[in-house]
Image (tube, rainbow, N blue to C red):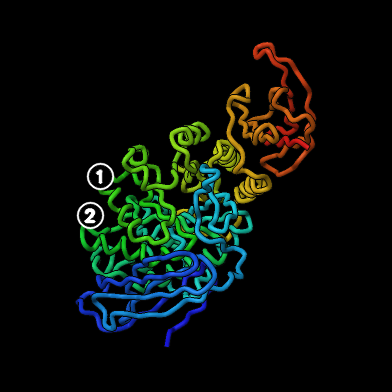
């Protein structure tokens, strides 16, 4: 009798295989599932999950009946057959895998066609919040809190051990998850067994990934990290291959996954090695999930690596606007500045992360500059970004970032292009949707203006206070600028802070 599993569209489901393994180490047993159905054909590797159990994780990409065959040269019985009945997905947060929009290559959209405004939140140790709790209660609490402010992506690591800068000055361990309670391999970080993965660790990671998917978060996952004191397997070793293959096999079926080789990828000087690791992930990823590297211009600037990456991830602490424009000019792909500043904690600029503190006003000003370049932003809060995770309070930046998020998602942001040539000075930035709609951002009190011949014949204009969210109708007047030999519409900023002007033809 054929075994049938029913699962919603885009939801991961596990096909379980048990039997005798011919190898001494079951983690090295090869296992593949071939799935065929209305969405195509997928060859998906399996993984060992402990207790003489292997799994092949599959998420259907179209409704209807899928058939599968699972085969292994190392496990008896060596073949399993069945089918998956894919039904509609009842969760409105789930839209399938993330893609680069082929019609607007600087932007993203989901598999079902829904546009995606990447609005990321750095929480490197998020998985550690769930260790020891099958309900991952704290993970849900943090995600629910930040979801209300528009965040839709978590940047996190598969494993991180310690950040020496991230500890309370008084030695307190309150809300400190470094080193974490569990290691990703059997053994310990000091005495690891790199040829055996810690299945309990990854079962917790499964629950965190499912929480992210259910709540509509993309998981931007760093496969490695160089500055968090992790004892990694030796490069090119069988144990290292096992790690990359294992993580890929276990999480590729989650449609919300993004692969990122490493946090601070530039630490890896051997770029051929780096390319080989990304290639290993891609050859084992049947779904071809999006891939990037964090801030490694030398790597993604090399032509031979162009086909390995889908978008660029920057860590740009200055020239926020110009750096994004340069990347757009170099290649037609999405630009993501994941790390352009750090919001300080309750202690303000004198808080114990003083080396990495920005005022919230400076931080949001940087975010607007990135967004005005047609790029995407990441949010860093010092009390949740690293191994100290304290979400008992709402930092001021949440509200300011939500103002930015709500503004851009209220317009068809993916249809706009940055136009430096439309403005008179660097104090004003411009996005334009043809000659029909404009967003002007003025980084200080003053005015914003556009050439008269670019203005719609009949339009509405509104100022947005980027610090408070207040809106006011904008009144413009024509003025002649002899230096430009042209007439321009001038709109005076009514706020004494940076503001955005939205002009739309009626």
Determine contact: label 1, label 2, CB under 8 Å.
yes
Using the image, determine if residue 159 lies above or below residue 352: below
Tell me the residue that label 1 is attached to.
270
Q: How dense is the environment of label 2, judged by Cα within 10 Å: few (below 14), some, or many (20 and up)?
A: few
Using the image, determine if residue 13 lies above or below residue 167: below
Q: Position of residue 369 (x, y in %)?
A: 57, 36
Using the image, determine if residue 43 lies above or below residue 18: above
Q: In this view, does 492 lie to the left or right of 166?
A: right
Q: Where is residue 309 in the image (x, y as percent from the top left)?
A: 39, 47
Q: In terms of secondary structure, where does tag 1 sit?
A: loop
- The disc at residue 217 is none
Using the image, determine if residue 416 lies above or below residue 126: above
Between discs 1 and 2, the one toward the N terminus = 2
| Residue 407 found in image quarter | top right
Residue 204 seen in render: yes
Residue at 60% across, 48% down? 397
Q: Position of residue 284 (x, y in %)?
A: 34, 61
* Nearer to us in this view, 85 or 279: 85
Tell me the residue that label 2 is attached to.
235
Q: In which quarter of the image is the N terminus?
A: bottom left
Q: In this view, does 450 lie to the left or right of 166?
A: right
């Amino acid at each position: 009798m054929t075994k049938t599993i029913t699962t919603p569209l885009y939801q991961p489901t596990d096909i379980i295989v048990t039997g005798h393994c011919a190898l001494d180490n079951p983690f090295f047993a090869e296992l593949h599932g071939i799935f065929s159905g209305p969405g195509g054909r997928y060859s998906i590797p399996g993984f060992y999950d402990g207790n003489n159990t292997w799994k092949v994780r599959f998420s259907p990409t179209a409704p209807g009946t899928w058939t599968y065959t699972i085969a292994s040269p190392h496990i008896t019985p060596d073949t399993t057959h069945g089918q998956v009945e894919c039904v509609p997905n009842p969760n409105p947060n789930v839209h399938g895998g993330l893609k680069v929009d082929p019609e607007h290559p600087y932007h993203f959209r989901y598999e079902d066609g829904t546009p995606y405004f990447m609005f990321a939140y750095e929480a490197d140790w998020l998985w550690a919040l769930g260790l020891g709790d099958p309900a991952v209660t704290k993970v849900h609490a943090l995600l629910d809190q930040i979801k209300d402010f528009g965040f839709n992506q978590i940047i996190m690591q598969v494993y991180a051990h310690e950040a020496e800068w991230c500890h309370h000055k008084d030695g307190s361990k309150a809300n400190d998850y470094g080193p974490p309670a569990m290691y990703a391999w059997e053994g310990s970080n000091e005495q690891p067994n790199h040829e055996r993965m810690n299945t309990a660790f990854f079962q917790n990671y499964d629950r965190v990934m499912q929480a992210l998917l259910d709540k509509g978060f993309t998981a931007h996952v760093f496969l490695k990290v160089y500055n968090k004191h992790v004892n990694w397997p030796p490069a090119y070793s069988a144990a290292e291959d096992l790690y990359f293959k294992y993580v890929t096999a276990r999480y590729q079926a989650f449609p919300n996954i993004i692969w990122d080789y490493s946090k601070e990828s530039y630490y890896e000087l051997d770029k051929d090695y780096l390319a080989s690791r990304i290639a290993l992930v891609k050859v084992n990823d049947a779904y071809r999930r999006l891939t990037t590297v964090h801030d490694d211009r030398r790597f993604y600037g090399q032509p031979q690596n162009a086909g390995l990456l889908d978008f660029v991830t920057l860590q740009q602490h200055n020239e926020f606007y110009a750096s994004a424009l340069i990347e757009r000019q170099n290649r037609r792909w999405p630009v993501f500045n994941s790390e352009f500043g750090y919001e300080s904690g309750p202690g303000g600029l004198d808080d114990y992360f003083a080396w990495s503190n920005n005022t919230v006003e400076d931080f949001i000003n940087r975010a607007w500059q990135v967004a005005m370049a047609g790029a995407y932003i990441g949010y860093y809060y010092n009390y949740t970004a690293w191994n100290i995770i304290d979400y008992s309070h709402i930092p001021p930046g949440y509200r300011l970032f939500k103002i930015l998020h709500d503004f851009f998602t209220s317009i068809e942001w993916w249809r706009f292009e940055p136009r430096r040539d439309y403005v008179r000075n660097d104090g004003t930035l411009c996005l334009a949707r043809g000659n029909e709609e404009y967003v002007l951002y003025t980084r200080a009190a003053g005015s914003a203006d556009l050439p008269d011949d670019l203005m719609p014949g009949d339009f509405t204009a509104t100022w947005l206070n980027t610090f408070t969210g207040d809106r006011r109708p904008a009144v413009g007047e024509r003025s002649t600028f002899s230096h430009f030999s042209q007439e321009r519409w001038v709109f005076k900023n009514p706020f004494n802070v940076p503001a955005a002007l939205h002009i739309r033809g009626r």
